[in-house]
Image (spheres, grey):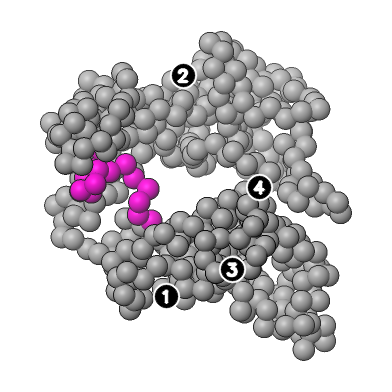
Amino acid sequence: MGTERYVAGGTGKTTLRPLESLQMAANGEISAEPPGQELVFKDTDAEGISRFRPVCPYFELHGRWTDGGQQVEGAITEALLKKLGIELESLRWTISLANLKAFQFTLAESDVVECELTLVGNDTNRTQLFAKCSRGEKDRRLIPDDLTIPVGWVQLSRPNTDFPELRLRFYPPTGLVYGPTDLKTRIADNLQPGEWAGFDLPGRLILNSAAAWPNYVFRSPVGLPNIPEDNRKVPSGIHAVFGNGQSLGLLDDVTDGIVRCSIGDVVATARVAVGPPDFAPDRRHPVSIQDGLADRVDRSGLRAGVPMDELEQLVKDLFERALETSDAMNKDTELDRLHDNRLPEERLRRAGADRDQPAIATIWPTKNEVAPTAHRADALPVSFAGHRKHRRYIAIEYLRDRLREDPALLDKWIRKPRDGFQDFDRRMPALMRGSHGDAMNITQRQYEMLRTWVASLRSEGVIS
């Protein structure tokens, strides 16, 4: 799957176009599926059930070796191994996965959910992966010793003439959720009648009700003093809990981990991660995983100097992503939510605000407040205005013109990273919560990129 950049008169979002895809047969044979006229985001299995296709599910083995006194690197093939005197069955592929969502809260070893499987290099059968709890006290293990939960499948490729490379394919799990055996009783005995009424997980209430996770109470860590600034609880409000803060004890089949391939003492390593499907694949987020990683390992790259044309492409890309994210949101609903919600007590303390003060600061008014006529009459006024304004900013020429009119534009409208308490106001990104629980901000690297571009325009005399 590939993408095309914005074009004049386009849709205002990334255009997806099909590319060649690889298919793996039941015996591990790889074949190519030429690009068609449409993109397929779901596969239908033998039972007629549609499942989302994984992104980049193949791990291809690469390495370095010496040939004729010269160091060579590239894909590892069966023919190359034979040339080096290594048999395919000498390879060992090890998949190590874990789900540590419960453990990160309870810090109970018995809540660690793990899976490890090793495959011989010539075993091309599809193998299912099962996770279990094997640490800590036996009678408190979240998954009882006699049970496991399926967390996906793996399969090694069978090399052929067209595709001689060695590959491992990872198939994600179904996306199921499991609960403690006494969940129905917990719901019935809940102090708030009707809360979670009717909720059930037929056939999947298998977890140990005596484990730490089903008995964990948020804001009061098991076995630990109450630490208000405990970052393991940020952002809050995204877990299944009763009104008193007690966890329902739910566990999903999502994992991440390591894929290793070893030949003797030589080991190649890669990461594998499972997450929810992307229901808007043509809408990119302003802060991606790549942005977060680059901010940690390559922030100095921008400071070393970037050519102006490359810098402008980076700026344009960021504003394109801002438009795509904006269009994927119902900004009016998010605005109402910010007006309705109250700041949590610990954040109010940090802000020095009164407990009953809405978390709106200088955020836009709602339709029910005093506002322009168009705002009150339009069904989605904030969403409409946001699309119109973001659409203009993907034209670098328009952005330059705005900076000529107001050289401090970006300083005023882009929320600075590491600003301490981040209020929900009109600065960008707006109406979105970051992983730290406050209003979202772009990375320090992205912020420095914008400032570097403005400084370059100033040095060229484009803006004052």
Residue 420 circle label: 1
- Pick out the residue farthest to the bottom: 464
Magenta residues?
235-248
> Looking at the image, is mark 1 or mark 2 earlier in the sequence?
2
Disc 3 packing (10 Å; few <14; some 14–19; many ≥20): few
Q: In x, y percent, where is residue 8?
A: 86, 54
| Three-letter residue code for mark 4 | Arg
**Separation (CA) of disc 1 from disc 4:** 29 Å
Q: In x, y percent, where is residue 387?
A: 70, 57
Q: Secondary structure at mark 4?
A: loop
> Looking at the image, is mark 1 or mark 4 earlier in the sequence?
4
> Looking at the image, is mark 3 or mark 4 earlier in the sequence?
4
54 to 89, vertically: above or below: below
- Tell whether position 241 is magenta: yes
State the residue position of label 4.
Answer: 283
Residue 371 circle label: 3
> Looking at the image, is mark 2 or mark 4 earlier in the sequence?
2
**Separation (CA) of disc 3 from disc 1:** 31 Å
User: Residue 420 versus residue 116: which sits nearer the camera?
Assistant: 420
